[in-house]
Image (tube, helix red, strand yellow):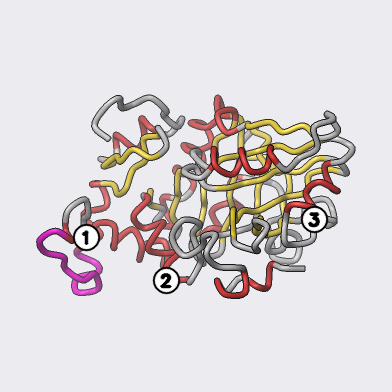
Amino acid sequence: MEKPRNIRLSPFHQRQQELGGVFFEAAGWERPQWHQSNEALLDEIAGDVAERRGWESKYWSPIAGAEHLGARSRVAMFDLTPFTKIEVTGGMALESLEHITSNRMDQPVGRITYTSMLNHKGGIKCDLTVTRLGKDKFMIITGGGSGIHDMTWIRANMPDDNSVQLSDVTSAMTCIGLWGPNSRELLSRVTPNDVSNEAFPYMSAQEIAVDGLTCLAFRISYVGELGWEIYAPVETGLHLWDTLWDAGQSLGVLAAGGAAFDSLRLEKGYRLWGNELHTEFNPYEAGIGFAVR
C-alpha cells in the first residue's frame, strides 16, 4: 500500500530508519523487511544466499539472507510491536478459553501454551499462544495481520454476561524478539534476573528488570533459536531497544527484518495461519496435533 503510510509506528521506528530500514506496510504498521546497514554482512556470507532474478527479486534483497544467517550465528533484534496482544480476564476466563482452544489452558501461572482455535468442522480458525499471568488473567499473542480476525472470533465465542473481559492492548505494549545463540548472554548483561535454562525454562514467562524498566519476558521463539520476546510499555520502548543494542555490540547484535523473520520460521518448519494453516485442515492434517489435548 502506497498511502496512507506512517500511520502506526513502533517506538523503534527512528532507530530502524537510522539503520536504513526498508519498510513495508502490514495491518497499518510500518515494518522493516531488511536494513541497509547489514549490507556489509554480505561479504561474510558470500555464496551462502541464493541469487534471485526477474520477478522473484522484486521486494527482496540478499541482505535479508544475511540477517537470517546472522540470527542463526549471533543474536538479532526483531521488532514485534505489531503482534496483537489481547488480555483475557474475569472469573470465567479459564473456562471460556478451555472451551474455544484445542489445547489445555489450566496451566501454572507463567506457563505459555501454543494452541489453535477450531470451527465446528475442526478446521483451524486461529493459531496463537496463551500465557497464564494469574489465576484469572491470560495474555493471547497472535499475528499483527490476523489480529482483528482472531479478536472477532474470540469475542463471538465468549460469554456475553460480562464474566470475561477482553482488552486489546496491542498499542499499549511494545515487543522485541531477542533471538540467536548469543541472546542469553546479551540478556544477562542487562538484567539482574537469572535467565539460565534452569531458572527460566522454555515456554515460560517472567517479569524481569532491564535497566530500570519492568518487562515481561516470554521464553519462546518463532524463528527456531534460543531467545525471548520482551514486552514493555510502549513509552519505554526506545530505552529498551537502546539498552539491548548497546549491550550487544561486542556480541555482534544486528537488527533483523520481516523477510528474515519469515524465512527463519519456514526453515524451522513453523506454520503460519493463512498460509500453511487454515480452515480446510484440522490440526492433525496440518501437523500440529501435539497442540490438541
Quarter residue 30 falls in = top left
Q: Position of residue 166 (x, y in %)?
A: 72, 33
Quarter holding the N terminus is top left
Q: Is residue 45 magenta?
A: yes
Q: Residue furthest front?
A: 121
In the rendered view, would you say 91 is above or below 260?
A: above
The residue to which callout 1 is attached is 62
Disc number at residue 267? 2
The three-letter amino acid code for the residue at tag 2 is: Glu
The residue indicated by pointer 3 is 105
Pointers 3 and 1 in contact (CB under 8 A)? no
SS under mark 3: loop
Cα separation between marks 3 and 2: 29 Å
Q: Nearer the viewer, mark 3 or mark 2?
A: 3
Q: Decide which of 73, 96 is in the foreground and name it.
A: 96
Q: Position of residue 265 (x, y in %)?
A: 45, 64
Tell me the magenta residue range: 43-55
Q: Quadrant of residue 152?
A: top right
| Structural crowding at the residue carrying mark 3, measured as other residues with C-alpha within 10 Å and reported as few (<14), some (14–19) or many (≥20) | many
- Dot 3 or dot 1: first in sequence order is 1
Left/right of residue 141 with respect to residue 80 in the rendered view: right
Q: Nearer the viewer, residue 171 or 289?
A: 289
Please report whichever mark, 3 or 2, sits nearer to the chain's N-terminal start.
3
Q: Nearer the viewer, residue 30 or 20?
A: 30
Q: Nearer the viewer, residue 56 or 229?
A: 56
Which residue is found at the position 49% from the left and 46% from the top? 247
Q: Residues within 10 Å of mark 1 (few under 14, many from 20)?
A: some
Q: Is residue 167 above or below residue 221?
A: above
Which disc number belongs to residue 5? none
